[in-house]
Amino acid sequence: MMTYSKPMKKLRVANRAQMAMVTVDVERLVGEEHAARAIWELTGQFDLSLFAEPIQSAAGEAGRPAWDPRLLVSVWLYAYSQGIGSAREIERQMAYEPGLEWLCGLEVINHHTLSDFRVQHGAALDELFVQMLAVLDQTGAIGLERVMHDGTKVKAQASGGSFRREKTLRERLEQARQLVAELKAVETEGESRTRQQAACERAARERVGRLEEALTELEREKRRTRSRVKDKRVSVSDPESRVMKQSDGGFAPSYNVQISTDARASVVVGVGVSQEASDHGELMPALERVVRNLGTQPRQVVADGGYATRDNIARTGEAGMELIAPVRDATAKSAGALRRAGIDVAFGPSSFQHDPKSNTLVCPAGKRLRYRTVNRKHGVLYKIYEAHGKDCRSCAHRRRCCPQERDRGRRVSIHPPEPWVVAHQQRMSTEQARAVYRQRGQVAEFPHAWIKTKIGLRQFRLRGLAKVKLEALWACLTYNVMQWVRLVWRPALTPA
């Protein structure tokens, strides 16, 4: 009996052991609706002369031509819109990413050129952000009837383990300087240095610079907070970063990014970066940035309770702006302070009656506390009253009223009700103000979420406050560009 074997399958396989010449039509790399085309069209409307001022190469003279600032701006805006924040990654993707290929015409820009361009044009970038706002304002996307403000903590390019005290910093600085001297001695003795030795010397000099910067920042922080040096630590990696609480409850070296958003079309109208973990002092600088960018102030400002300090309430009212922000209940805070001092709640400041004629306080036991001085804390004026030590020593309520005071009498701080604070509380009790405040989350928090999710800016790639500000400004500029694409450019492509 004869058997027949099945014929072998005829299959087509990839031949990678070959070279091919490929014809590429650059214009057809991306479609008409591609974001790269929108960004290139938009950057053509801007005056980029400030970016071009440092360029020294001139037509008709020797030297390599410089890259067009419009191209570099477009590359960074497109890269950020695609969640790429690394200059090296941009250079790598220029070999195959269609949008970058189309923008650069199949050329590849060195990552050093891209990195330097991002951080060397602070004034030009500020001007570009203002020009972007002017473009959006002409389309009616900005009204300034209502601006919503919020802040978020973005991690620094440093770890918690990089923080050191002054003693450790000085010891390591001395070691680094000795290493630099030893590496220089090799060249002095006439021995030829290898590239590895040169790189080691360069790294040692950079380490000396970082340690010197850390010590300078430590002294600056000491003067600012008026605390002892041994209680302060700074990061060797990023000395200007500060440890801040994160949204997940942890702590990490971070910066406080403040963003102001116009409520009409969710356009970012102001951005700043602070080293302060608290938002108390960030509202007025943010509003000043809005005025500087647009030439006029908003009619209404909406923020969360962290900005509703008495100083901010007063200053916004004096400037003619209506502040919508809930005032935090001071009862819980006062109860916590009393508990830490061992004072019974029944003997809190509210139980002391004020006598306006004699400007004294009368305690629950009937004794009088004299006016001593005035103190300012977080923009709030507090009047300090103090009882006689002999009155408190002989008082039957001493253990409940002033258990930690030995010789001095009980001290009580009170602040009189300011008219503007009372008016603000009355305004916040209305349903209209509450309805406005309920819109805050979807407007004020959206840019933060977009920047962290789309751009991936959950941690800065750059170090130092000045460079971090530029990175935040690039991110917010990209956000506004994509808002322009959504509001103006894409609708214009749709046939009527």
Image (tube, helix red, strand yellow):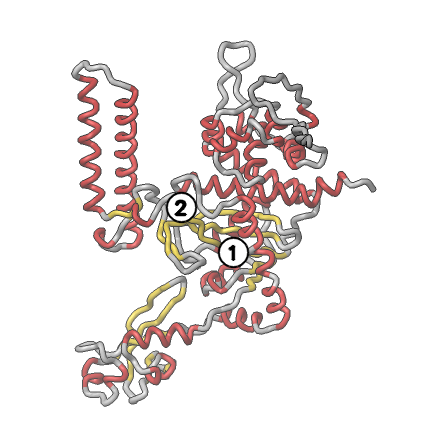
- Kind of residue sitting beneath label 2: Ala
Vertical relation: 260 (above or below) 9: below
Residue 223 is situated, as x and y percent measured from the top left of the image, at: 28, 50
Please name the residue shown 63% across and 42% down the image: 482
Vertical relation: 237 (above or below) 111: below
**Residue 65 visible from this viewpoint:** yes
Q: Is residue 329 left or right of residue 199?
A: right
CA distance separating discs 2 and 1:
19 Å
**Residue 70 visible from this viewpoint:** no
The tag on residue 156 is 2
Please name the residue shown 68% across and 29% down the image: 7
| Callout 2: SS | loop
Residue found at the far right of this picture? 496
Task: Give whichever of 315, 347 is nearer the camera.
Answer: 347
Task: Give whichever of 307, 365 is nearer the camera.
Answer: 307
Task: Give whichever of 324, 192 is nearer the camera.
Answer: 192
